[in-house]
Amino acid sequence: MGATFKVTPNVKAHAELKYITEDTFDVGQPTFFDIFISDRTGATSVSTIRSSSAFDIRLSDNAYLPTNLKSAIQNNRINIYSAPTTTQGGQLLGTAAAPYARSALRGPDRNQQNTRDLLRGVISFEGDYDQFAFVKNISWDAGYTYGQVEVTNRERGVDVERMAFAADAVVDTFGAVNGQAGQIVCRVQLLDAQGRAINDAVRGGDVRDSVTGRSAIDQCQPLNIFGDGNQSAEALEYIYAEVGVTERNEQEQFLGSVSGQLWDFWGAGPIGVALGAEHRREYTEATGRDRETGDRLLFLNTSPDMEGVEYTSDEFFGELSLPLFRESFLGDYAELSASYRTFDYSTIGTGDVYGVNFVYRPIRDIAFKTSYNTSLRAPNLSEIYEPYSETFSFTGSNDPCTTANINAAANAQYKENRVRNCTALAQEQGLTFDFAGATPENTDDFGILYGTGSISGVSGGNRNLQPEESESFTFSTVLQPRFIPNFSLVLDYYEIELTNVIAAVTPAVAAANCVDGPTLNAAACATIFRNNPNVPFGVGAPQGDPLGGYIQGSLNYAKRSTRGLDFDARYRVDFDEMIGRNWGRLDYSIGGTWLIEQKQFNNAQNPNDYTGQDSNLYYPRVRFTSSATWTPINALSVNWTVDWQTAQDIVQARTFVANADSRAVQYMDTGNFARHDFTVRYKVRDDLTLRAGVVNAFGAEQAPWLGYTLYSNFDPYGTRYFIGLNFRR
């Protein structure tokens, strides 16, 4: 709600208050476990919990293991081969018993219940005066804004210890647990009833030494992990776990500005001037999952509390516009303008940015505009101060140093760089691997010891982040020729360079950045830890390591640079005026970008290390939107819109030549892409409009040879239809 008051004939006051609450429920990726089935532990020991997504159950006495599956595992054998030589592969020597198996289980779904409450209040004043001293046409405004957002998030997953206890189900032959012979119970309950030791893999000591462990035994419900739908409601409720996080954000802003006109020295128009100041404060705090996790091992991320942090900024700015001439022998109009802003952030210190703009219109049909501007983005509070929380966003298949990934690299230069850089990293640990896959045997390859499970790491802020800075140059041409009524054309050439680019980087991207360049990228390598106890040189860390295998967060890339041409053309045809037919009106527009160059400089230690992205995936050389709207009568319109993109390279030609049998030539790029949308609008009355249509009418989709990875610049959703009403009071 809002209100406007006229305080005096020259001063107005505005007030606004907004409150929004929303509840969302999300079902995410299911839990997943590697369950190892064997008799490696005895019947009088609790089965091993290997990690938050892996544990053991026994083969010979699990109460739910189907007989045919048990028999198959018990009779399983593996082939034994001799070592290969340079001229001959390994030879079959015989077989050996292998009574064990791994079950890759997809467990119960994870879900989230999220509540978000937003409150925002604004009070402002504005006014105008004809003249004060030598300043004319004065306008001023001043205002205060306060906003806060409170978020409560409840997350549901699985208690891993309880999952392992419940899955390790046995038959209580003599009724030691509940006095009922032949009942299926949790092994941990049977061991407790027999008075045996129960090793605590989560907290150390005996499971019964902690309140959490004691309740896990007492409440245990046996769980059948074989077959969808075979799980009892009681067992599922027993293994479920729930934790919550809360977050509070506040923002305050004081903003004031004044503008006016000075002298008109030579008849081109008065000099314009504007001055202003802004004070801003942002605050955030949060409670983490660790409060409720306690001493449990959960298939949920962990996170500590985030103590309250804030930043303040004070900024002063000014703008000046200087008309150079108007309707003179030099042309129709020209103006030079400049802007300047100085700032003081409590997080990054002081600095300034500025800009210069020039407009020249030689005749009324054409105008030229050019500008040079600098800007700065300070890292936000979360990017700097967010505490580390556990995450599982990396697997062995993401490691760019595995022999398999190096040989699968589409870019020949990346392959060469990875072999050299991964070799250097391994040598620092005194290790040697066949990263290039040059030897006939695979026993010296790197990566074969990785499992399928996720690797633990942490996600959080980076207190060493530097502010992101940019410089931009533009040159524009605007055509509105009188001899072509209702036509306009805008061409905008741009060059933009960003330095110290702030980027949120996944561990997979960081690991690749570490080794993809001609030299090691020290900043990226510093976030990847190759201390995996089960995989020499592998990403990971021993259980209990505070950082795990990687740090996921924001970092500064060296630079991004791009240049291109934006274009926009519009034309309107009134059929009655043009051909004397009452066929209504046709409006057509086409607008898009011709990308000339896109370079990414990721390695701050090597300013010449860049990757050209223009015409690669996500960066089409040309992309435009064409829109045609026919309005036969004022109340009815029909629109046809096309989103068109040029083919994008999957494999570059220089790389393809080095490995020409890797794919058929026609699969080197995505092929051109076009999505067609149709919309019909009908104005039922002045306050009611009906709209209906189809999006992606012809079912355009990304090239199937891109695999299962979805690329956001293509349409992943297929054909869909819509109908709606717009009501306006």
Image: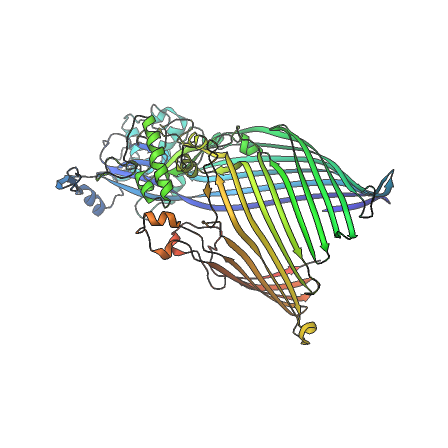
Q: Is residue 715 left or right of residue 580?
A: left
The percent coordinates of residue 517 (x first, y second) are 41, 37
- Residue placed most toward the observer, 32 or 185: 32
Residue 626 sits in quarter: bottom right
Q: Residue at x 37, y 26 (%)?
A: 203
532 to 413, vertically: above or below: above
Q: Residue at x 64, y 40 (%)?
A: 373
Residue 193 sits in quarter: top left
Q: Is residue 696 left or right of residue 659?
A: right
The percent coordinates of residue 339 (x first, y second) are 70, 39
Q: Residue at x 63, y 35 (%)?
A: 250
- Residue placed most toward the observer, 171 or 29: 29
Quarter of the picture containing the C terminus is: bottom right
- Residue placed most toward the observer, 364 or 239: 364
The percent coordinates of residue 223 (x first, y second) are 33, 41
The percent coordinates of residue 685 (x first, y second) are 69, 66
